[in-house]
Amino acid sequence: HDALLGFDAEDFHRGQFFPEEESLVRTLTESVEEYYLPRCNHLTAASPGIATAYAETIGVQKPDVILNVFSLDERHGHTPPEVLEAEKPAEGVISLYWYSQVIGPNRGLLDALRALSFLEDHVHLTLRGTWAEGFEDQLRSEAGALGVEHRLRVLPPAPPDQLVERAAQHDVGLALEQSTKVNRDLCITNKI
């Protein structure tokens, strides 16, 4: 149809696989990137690392970088006051806060629980998201073994325009991304 083509690289998709992993999905990902990215009229990337990796790997012009950040107008007025009040941790509690769409493995959460066990009892860990299949039992079992299950709070997902206000109810935001795949070394998550 002679249409223009653009692509926004939210991640370095070929880097989302373990280095030794050989799979059909990996092969298809690489094939699609190599075929379509050079044909794009416009490329953007979510971090300088992703932009550089695509330029060097595929040989395309370095994509423009658009950081994955929240708008300043999302800081106030999107969440009902009674919801914000319920979001606040109990009096005297210091809340470590982590959120994502999925609460799952390889996200640094087990490390956070282990660290929590070394902190004073008034420091709690608050997670927001939907459980990955089977991970809730694993995390809660680890929390029990460490004696911190009473310091773990899990909140349901929230509308995107309320994330900033809700995060502001907590004391310390956590960005726990682990360097298990090349993509994690290159991306800058919106948690940062």
Image (spheres, rainbow, N blue to C red):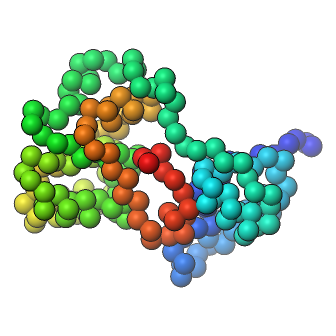
Looking at the image, is 62 positioned above or below residue 164?
below
Q: Quadrant of residue 91?
A: top left
Q: Is residue 55 left or right of residue 188?
A: right
Q: Is residue 185 left or right of 42 when viewed as pictured?
A: left
Report x, y in % for residue 40: 82, 51
Question: Which residue extends farthest bottom?
Answer: 20
Residue extending farthest to the right is: 2
Image-quadrant location for residue 117: bottom left
Image coordinates of residue 2 in percent, x first then y, are 92, 43
- For this view, does 174 lie left or right of residue 154? right
Q: Is residue 17 visible?
A: yes
Residue 113: quadrant of the picture: bottom left
Which residue is at 31% across, 33% downward? 168
Q: Quadrant of the N terminus?
A: top right
Residue 131 in the image: state x and y as whole percent. 32, 51
In this view, 156 is above or below 152: above
Q: Is residue 141 visible?
A: no
Q: Say if 11 sits above or below 94 in the image.
A: below
Residue occupying the point 26% across, 23% down: 83
Q: Residue at x 35, y 28 (%)?
A: 165
Q: Please indicate whether residue 48 sits to the left or right of residue 78 in the image.
A: right
| Camera-nearest residue between 113 and 172 | 172
Q: Nearer the viewer, residue 184 or 1?
A: 184
Q: Residue at x 44, y 48 (%)?
A: 192
Q: Is residue 82 above or below residue 49?
A: above
89 and 40: which is toward the camera: 89
